[in-house]
Amino acid sequence: MNLETYYEYCLSKKGVTEHFPFDEETLVFKVGGKMFALSSLVQWEKGTPSLNLKCDPEYAQELRAQYDAITPGFHMSKVHWNTILVNKDVSDLLLKELIDHSYNLVYKNLTKKTQSNLDSNRE
């Protein structure tokens, strides 16, 4: 996966916004004001990209056991976040599924009002 594909895929989701809340290099995607994906633009430029994605704790453990490129979230809650090394042993298809999983985890925990606002703004 390349940066453009990652960027466009995340932004294609309902209600997603992009931010740089930590510094000028860490791109964060949010839905309803809550983070679901983040990545260092500098690491993409260096050719060593990784993503931090939210994950169900049990599923996170399974993924970490199955893939060398999936580890506990760097600088994040090790229980609820994974770091995925891009273009290693995780396919682009699985990477998109993990982005979806992260997005869905965050979306389902938004208030009904926030979900409704996002749904009504989707045209």
Image: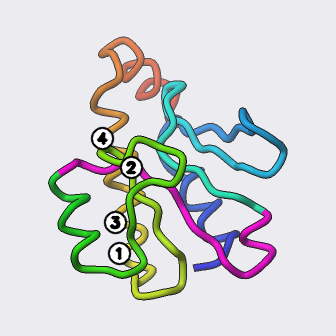
Residue underneath mark 4: 105
> Label 2, on which residue?
81
Residue 123, compared with residue 7, is above or below; it is: above
Upstream in the sequence, badge 1 or badge 4?
A: 1
Looking at the image, residue 6 sits to the left or right of residue 100; the answer is right
The answer to whether mark 3 and mark 2 are in CB contact below 8 A is no
Of 59 and 113, nearer the camera is: 59
Residue 97 badge:
3
Q: Which residues are magenta?
A: 42-57
- Taking the spot 38% from the left edge, 58% from the top edge, the residue there is 72
Residue 56 lies, with reference to residue 45, above or below; the image says: above
User: Contact (CB < 8 A) between labels 3 and 1?
Assistant: yes
Element under label 3? helix
Residues under numbered marks 1 and 2 in contact, where contact means CB atoms less than 8 Å apart:
no
Task: Name the N-terminal-most of marks 4 and 3.
Answer: 3
In space, the residues marked 3 and 1 are separated at their CA atoms by 5 Å
- Depth-wise, is mark 3 or mark 2 nearer the camera? 2
